Image: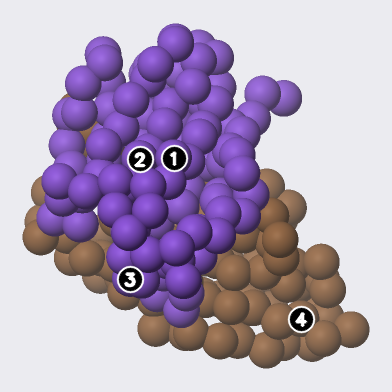
Chain colours: A purple, B brown
Amino acid sequence: EPEVTQTPSHQVTQMGQEVILRCVPISNHLYFYWYRQILGQKVEFLVSFYNNEISEKSEIFDDQFSVERPDGSNFTLKIRSTKLEDSAMYFCASRADTDTQYFGPGTRLTVL
Amino acid sequence: AQSVSQHNHHVILSEAASLELGCNYSYGGTVNLFWYVQYPGQHLQLLLKYFSGDPLVKGIKGFEAEFIKSKFSFNLRKPSVQWSDTAEYFCAVNEGGATNKLIFGTGTLLAVQP
């Protein structure tokens, strides 16, 4: 069964550094998402992406964040200058035309 | 704005006990409802979903959920839990439309004791 994959599984970085989190959505899916879960808190929507552009973003998704689908298979989330409060689990999800989103295993980002 | 409430944050049960996890949402329009499960060290997996039709939906692994529109609820049930059901359970809603973003509850951590 096809799955969403994410790399790396764990990323440790220094405050102020740039990080890129990578996701490979399910191949025939058209809609892509990033969510995050700060330890002990709920899963929060960050951004949705369709037809090579952002379709919706949350208040969390400020100018430090960007998304890209550089090559038709990968879907990346970049944080330009990480802050301590960016430490969280980041989940990628994708869906086809149905309403069901399929999630990847997540990337745990630790900002020191 | 939509919100989702899961009132049980941590539930401990013995094997064979019955399970009911509460989920309430606040939104007056048409919603799609989901329960996701996250087993230890694994990713979020879809347990079941409700879009329309029969308000009692059956999912994988013997789980079911009932949509009660008048109560804005979508409670998850299982008649007899197993140790392997130990996981975190998330209720989520979306209102459909272009983006279909999911709004999650805080999750319920279920521990099943053998």
Question: Is A77 drawn above or below residue A84 in the view shown?
Answer: above
Q: Earlier in the sequence, mark 1 or mark 2?
A: 1
Nearest the eye: A80 or A97: A80
* Element carrying mark 2: strand
Q: How much space separates mark 1 and mark 3, taking CA atoms? A: 16 Å
Question: Is B67 drawn above or below residue B19 in the view shown?
Answer: above
Q: Which residue is mark 2?
A: A78
* Element carrying mark 4: strand
For the residues carrying marks 4 and 1, which lies nearer the camera in this image? 1
Kind of residue at badge 3: Glu
State the image coordinates of residue B65 (x, y, percent, origin top left).
50, 58
Protein chain holding label 2: A
Protein chain holding label 3: A
Q: Which residue is mark 3?
A: A85
For the residues carrying marks 2 and 4, which lies nearer the camera in this image? 2
State the image coordinates of residue A1 (x, y, percent, origin top left).
72, 25
Q: Quadrant of residue A51?
A: top left
Check residue A20 in the rendering and tell me which mark sits there, or answer none: 1
Q: Which residue is mark 4?
A: B112
How many numbered discs sit on the rendered protein?
A: 4
